[in-house]
Amino acid sequence: MTESNLLPAAIQTERLLIRVAKPGDGIVFNQAVAESAEHLQKWLAWATPTPGIDQSELICRHAYARFLLNEDLRALLFLKNNGALVGSSGLHNANWQLRSFEVGYWGRTQYLGAGLISEGVAALVSYALDNLMANRVFLTMDERNLASQRLAERVGFEYEGTLRQDRMSIQGGLRNTRVYSIIGN
């Protein structure tokens, strides 16, 4: 693999096409975020306030530029059978020297509970471990986000600990952050 293509443009699973966000995705991204705003705004600062279509397009363009520089992979998760955007995941905060990546994710409300986000996260983690030779893949979450904790455990992440009062919550006030990781071979 060359330096120009360390991150994958697309990955397929049984039910999903997982591909980098790119210019032109703003409308479908915006629709998914707007439909899921009430849920997303509990946990994700970028979703508050709900971005408009132009801002959503800028988010997708910025994500694509960072992908081209091997800095970040914001992936969109599409159902293979009908092309519906069901959520997003990605490999973020890449530390190429340590081979460490942070996983992020969110799901479109109408598709939650079907295991689709878990499937997408698992595929990206496998790619990081098998193709990028990741030493560490980790994720963090507000300790009150029980659904996210279950997803992490379902995918095989191990709980490392809780960072106490380390971030501001979306609602204001300090929050605790749970840290999970998978260590490569």
Image (tube, helix red, strand yellow):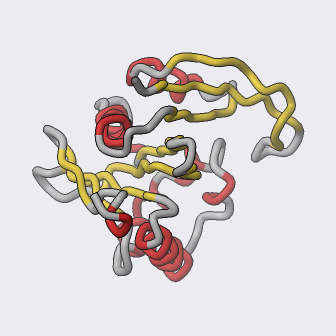
**x, y (%) of residue 57?**
47, 78
| Quadrant of the rendered image containing residue 173 | top right
Q: Nearer the viewer, residue 119 or 179?
A: 179
Q: Nearer the viewer, residue 31 or 66?
A: 66
Task: Give percent across and percent down for residue 49.
Answer: 67, 64
In the rendered image of this protein, does residue 183 appear above or below residue 55? above
Relative horizontal placement of residue 48, taking residue 146 as reference (left or right): right
Q: Nearer the viewer, residue 22 or 45?
A: 22
The correct choice, above or below, for 51 with respect to 61 in the image is: above
Residue 91 lies, with reference to residue 59, above or below; the image says: above
Q: Report the side of 100 relative to 107 (left or right).
A: right
For the point 60% across and 64% down, the residue is: 50
The one nearer the camera, 143 or 18, is 18
Rendered residue at 23%/51% (across/down): 11
From the top left corner, tell me how far across and down residue 125 is, in percent.
38, 36
Q: Tell me what residue is drawn at x 49 percent, y 35 percent.
A: 137
Up the image or down, 51 lies above or below 133; here it is below
Left or right: residue 11 compared with residue 139: left
